[in-house]
Each structure stands twice: as C-alpha cells, then as structure tokens.
Image (cartoon, helix red, strand yellow):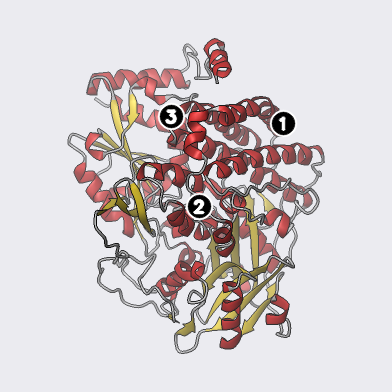
Amino acid sequence: MLKALLGNLTAVASHRGWPRVEVDAGTWQAIGEALREGKLDLLGEWGDEAAVHCALFEPATGQLSIASIAVRADRVPSLAVFHPPAMRLERTIVDLFGHEVIGLPDQRTWLDHGRWATRAPLAAQAKSPQSPRPYRFLESDGPGLHQIPVGPVHAGVIEPGHFRFTATGETVVRLEERLGYTHKGIETLLRGQKIDQGAPIAARVSGDSTVAYSLAYARAVEVALACRPPQRAVWLRGVMAELERIANHLGDIGAICNDAAFSMMHAECGILREETLRTCAAAFGHRLMMDRIVPGGTTADLTATGKDAILALTQGLNRQFPELIELYDNTASLQDRTVGTGGVSAALAAEFAAGGFVGRASGRSFDARAALAYEPYDALPVKAVVRTEGDVDARVWVRILEVQASVEWLEAALRSLPAGPVLLPAIAAPASSVEATAIVEAFRGDLLAYVRIGPELRIERCHLRDPSWFQWPLLEIAIDGNIVADFPLCNKSFNCSYSGHDL
Amino acid sequence: MRRRLFKNLFNAPVTEPVTPGGPETLEAAGEALRGAISRHLGRSLAIREVDAGSCNGCELEIHALNNAFYDIERFGVRFVASPRHADLLLVTGPVTHNMREALERTYAATPAPKWVVAVGDCAAGCGVFAGSYACVGAVNKVIEVDLAIRGCPPTPLDLLRGLIWLLGRP
C-alpha cells in the first residue's frame, strides 16, 4: 500500500533514515482513504512553517514513511476528515501554526485556551491573540442526564486536565476530555537551540518518560547528523529504558489496584518501585535518570557498583514479583473490579494505532522495539507481550508480563555489556539543513521525534509526539457504559500523560 | 493473600528504621517534622498538591513520600483531596498560562492561615521553560510562596527537609 502510494515519488534528500516524500493533494487524500480503510497506521502528524507532515506505518509489510504536503496560502487539506485519530493533532497544528486545515471536522481550538499573549506561536509570523472564548463541549441531551465537571485540579497527586462527564444515574453516557492545561510551549522553546541545549528541554516533556524522550530526541539528532553513538552507550541506553519501564509499570500496577480499593498491592508495588528508583540512582546517579542520554551517547557511565545493584534488583524482582502476581490473580474482589471494566475493542485500538499497554491489551501487537528493531533491540529482542481482552485486567497483565520481559532483557544485556567510551567527543555540524525521524518505545508506547537541524547545529524544528495522543481518545470510549465510580480505575489503567500530550 | 499477610506480619517493616544521632536520616528528619507540626498545628498537616504545569517528575517524588520507605503519614502529614481541607499547598511546575486561573482559585479556596511551598526548579524559577510564551513562570509570580524546594526533581528526603524547615521557623 505504502509502496503503491508513495513508491514512485523521490524521497527528500535532506531527510535521513526513513524516507520522507512530498505529496500532492490527491495523494494526501489517498493516504487519508488508506488510513480510513485500516491499511496504514498513523504514527504522527505535525506542522511546519510551510508543510504538514505525517508518519505512516504499514503493518502488513513493516514499512514506514513520512509524507509531507505543502501549505499553500496558509491552507492545507485535512486527514482527520477521513481518519478521526488525526483530529486533535490537526487542531494542534491550527493552534500552533495558524494554518487553515480544510475540512477539519472539529474547528474548536485544542491547546490554545485563549490565554497566551500570542497566537500561532510557531508560525513564521506569530499572530495577535484572540480574546478567550468559552469552550463549547459536545452536547448531550435527554431525560435524566446530568453533567459532572472534573478538573483541571484533580483530587489526587496527579496532573491537571478537565473531564466532562454526562451520566444517567451512575452510568456514564459521554466523557469529553479537555486538555492543554500544562502546555509549556516546548516546541517553540526548542527552536533555535543548539542540539545540546535542546536535550534538557526534551528530557522534561514528561518526567516519567524522561529516558524515552531523551532517547527519541538523541536518536533523531544522530540519524539526521549521520553519527553513531559508541556501542557501550547504545546498551546503557537500553538498560536505562528498561529500568524506566519497570519502575513505571510497577507504580501503575499498584495504583490501579489502589483505585480498586486494594491498597495492599499499592503498598507492595510501591516498595518494589522505590527499590527500582534507588537502584537507578545507584547505577546512574539520578532516580529518574534525567539528562543521562544526550545526542552522541550518554553523559554517565554505569557506576562501579551499578551492574551489581541492577542485578540485585532483578534478582529481588524475580523473587518477590511472582507472589504479587499471584495475589493479583487470586483476589476475587479485585478481579471483580478489573475484569470486563473499561473495554477497548481490537478494531478501535487498531484504528487509533494505540501503542503500549493500551494497544497490546486489545490485540495490537505493535512494539517499536520489535517492529522497528532499533539498537540495541535488534541484537537482543524483548519478549513480545500481547493480550486480546481489552479491559482493565488485560492492561494490568500486559504491564505484569512486560516487567518480567524487561527483567529478563536486563539480565541478558548486563551479561554482554560492551566496554569502551560512552560519548562521542564531538558532533560535526552539517553543511546544510538535515532532518530525521525516530521512534522509540516508551513505557506508555511508541514515542515519535522529528528534528531538523541547520548549520551551527541549531534546531530549526523539533516535534515530539507522546504515545498518549492515540490513547486519550480511547479512554473516552472505554468509560462509555461504565459507572462513574469506575472512571479512576479506567483512567489509571490508561495512565496517559498530560504533560507529554500538552507539550 | 492470607499467606502474604501472614508473612508481612512477621517480616521487619521496610520503613526506614531509627538511626540514632544522624540529623540526615529520614527518621530523625521525620521526628523533627512531627515535633514542628504538633507545635504549630496540633496533630496533623494537611497538604493539597497542585500541578500547575509540571512535567510530572515532581509528582512522582511527592508520591514516593507515601510509600512504605518514607511513610510520611506516620509523621502526621496527610495529602487531602480538597484545598478546603488543606493547611499547605504544594505547587509544582512553571505555572502555565492555561493553569494560572486554576491555581489562583485553588489558593483562594484554601482557608487561612495557609502556607505555599513551591516544589522543583520550575516552580522555584521556571527551570528550562523560562522565556516561553505559554508559561507565567515561578509560582511566586502568581501567589505568595513561603518556601521553594529546589531540585529536578527534589528527592523525597529533600521534600521532607523542606517541610521541616518551614514548620520549624519561629
């Protein structure tokens, strides 16, 4: 499909790695139709001053391409009109670039709440702001319906966002999300930075995925500049990425059970999570391993005791985690809450190309580590995990099995860790603009980074697409027909990022 | 489950034990905190956490305060769901323009006397997000701040030390 659509077009020379092709309106529409028919997965759509790009993956062949359409007279045709998962991405393009997306079904702003002193901040010429207008939520009308507005400040220690529930009695008939509260203007901040100054900003898009963001950013920069980090750094990055995954999955498993009022699992998983974070600090000098991965390698090598600390952690997990799995699996009152709750169909997971535990709990096996086999996973694959039930329970199980797969991977990786330096001494500046796209598997799912770098190694454009973009919309569907009291449970089983999404 | 409960009954707790003498130990810090809380507030300190635009790194470490190792509740510190129940607001993030009003309204809903603690480099001084069109900046640009705890993110122990300092002031 991808070959038939884009095969006879010449790839843009400045884009390294996967091909990027420039398409006309007819091909853009054909892409939209292929997405609608489920022949292609949309892995991202983002704006530029004079173009809109989309990343396309063909599951049948494993091919990936970037397609770009030129913006003419500030106008560009919509993909969302064919493929709803593109809706919020295109609303964001309108908010940040001010392009008019022709045919975009939802014309409301998304990240722009009318509170910035500017409009279209990424446009060649930023526009003067509009006065804030009330946000029109979708209408729900019928006897006995009532609305419950929640947020942006939530009851727990979590990120801000607004949920508008419409319920009849206890049953949710519609949930509408409104996000953008944590929008920090990251893509604008990145523009014009030198690549090394951009790294700490990219590392802070979503703190729980700081390793994955740094990795995606570093890989995109390295592919664009055609430089390869030392082998030891490649493996250390893998070790950090799996430690981050283990820590987050453990936290999530406990928190999901806690939202089903089973606090014992929360306490037990909290202990394992804390032990993981302490191991990260012992091995890499920071509990979340922030700023450890940079273009060209890693800033920190494993400490002298780091390897033993990680092996002690994995041994501890091998000993203690099976008991917790048994506890989860054999507690009927807990299973009663998680089994059958918050269902996402396989068809929807596929349509939205949902990554991570959301997709893999609903039969979509895509895992960037396997499907795109980037280093070091090309040499040492991770055991694949997939479930088909699509409920909260399945999302818990995917996490459980992924913790075990990551532990196994870590033990194997540490056995064969290559020696040598961890950072390239210098990265040469390009003669003219170069660009690249990278996709890595964060704990939530596939994370896309696109960079264009000019002479003097300055970033001309950097786009970072969180896995949550394709998961948040499914949460609205997962809660449909469930009771309001099960929302925290469903929400936690998704654990979408607000900051990563709002950017 | 019964087996696990039984085992836990006889296992030593992971909660950091009393280490006599060292002012740097968690237990010592916690005891100092408990003393300060009882001097100022009676028996407990109720905290409402407000994420005003953080990357969620600070939230992870604030969460950690509640795990079995730190177990901050044993010192009388409790996280509450409503600002109306709170003595102290723990605010994270470079305050974004989109969150400014929510933060102001949360502050207004908190009964006086109240404290505000800005947590993390962003809340203390906007961090790496300085200069963005989307950020107001440090928390003290929006509401009065009693203490800023720096770090990216500050460790659970840093957070605990900060609270002790605040409550121990004359």
- Gap between marks 2 and 1, in whole Å? 28 Å
Q: Name the residue under label 2.
A: A204
N-terminal of the pair, mark 2 or mark 1, is 2
The residue that mark 1 highlights is: A311
Residue position marked by numbered label 3 in the rendering: B66
Callout 3: residue from which chain?
B
Image point 37% across, 50% down: which residue?
Answer: A160
> Which element type, helix, strand or loop, lies under badge 3?
loop
Check the residue under mark 2 and report the chain it is in: A
Q: How far apart are marks 3 and 1 (CA)?
A: 26 Å
User: Disc 2 or disc 3, which is closer to the eye?
Assistant: 3
Q: Which amino acid does label 3 sit on?
A: Asn
The N terminus of chain B - image quarter = top right
The quadrant holding residue A451 is bottom right
| Chain letter for mark 1 | A
Alpha carbon separation for disc pair 2 and 3: 24 Å
Picture coordinates of residue A82 (x, y %)? 51, 76
Q: Name the foreground residue: A445 vs A115.
A: A445
